[in-house]
Amino acid sequence: MRYTGKAHRVGDHIDTDAIIPARYLVSTDPRELGQYCMAGISPDWIKGVEQGDILVAGANFGCGSSREHAPLALLGAGIPLVIARSFARIFYRNGFNMGLVLLEVGDQADALREGDQLQADAEEGIIRNLTTQQEIQVRPLPDFMRKILESGGLVPYVRKRLESAA
C-alpha cells in the first residue's frame, strides 16, 4: 500500500461538516461528494487537488458528527490517504470502514508543508517527504486493517468473508 502525491494542508479540528457540508449529503456516490470536498473550508479547495494527492491535517481531524460521507468525499476527490497529527476516533474508524487510509503522525505532521511531494508506505509505516528528503516513521497498519482496505472497505471485506465461508 504505497502512495505518492502532493500534500494539501488543513489545520486543527477540521470537522466532518467542513469536509462535506450537510447540504451535499443527498448522495452517497463518492464522485458526487468529491466535487464538494472541503467546501466547508473553501468552495474552490477541490480545484487544486489531483488524483492521488495526500491530505495532511492537524489535530483531531474528522471531529463532529459521525458522517460516513466525509471519508467518501475525500476518496471521491481522489485523496486515498490522510496523514494527521491525530484523528477523531469515530472518523478514524469510519475512514477505514470506507476504504480511506489514515496515518497518525503526532507532532511530525508539522514537518509536512503545503505542496510537498510525499511518498507513504502504509505497510512499512514510512512517510518520505521527497521535497525535503525527511523521513517519518509511523506504526505500520495492522494486518486486519490492511485487509479491510485492500477489500475496499468493511462492507466488501465482510461480503468477501461470508462468500468464502459459504
Image (cartoon, grey):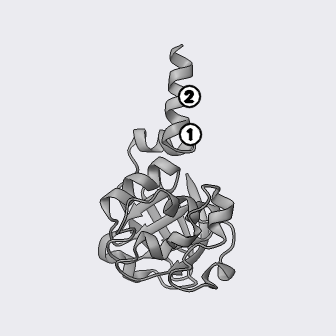
Graded by Cα atoms within 10 Å as few (under 14), some (14 to 19) or many (20 or more), the crowding at tag 1 reads some
Would residue 49 be found to the left or right of residue 141 on screen? right
Camera-side residue of 132 and 104: 104
Camera-side residue of 148 and 32: 32
Residue, x 40% and y 49% (percent of image)?
A: 141
Q: Are marks 1 and 2 in contact (CB under 8 Å)?
A: yes
The secondary structure type at the circle numbered 1 is: loop
Residue 151 — which label?
A: 1
Which mark is first along the chain, 2 or 1? Answer: 1
Would residue 82 be found to the left or right of residue 29 on screen? left
Where's residue 63, x and y in %? 35, 69
Residue 160 — which label?
A: 2
Q: Quadrant of residue 30?
A: bottom right
Q: Amino acid at mark 1?
A: Ser
Residue 35 visible somewhere in the drawing? yes
Would residue 53 be found to the left or right of residue 143 on screen? right
Instruction: Work out how far the residue at label 1 is from the one at label 2, CA to CA, in angstroms.
Output: 8 Å
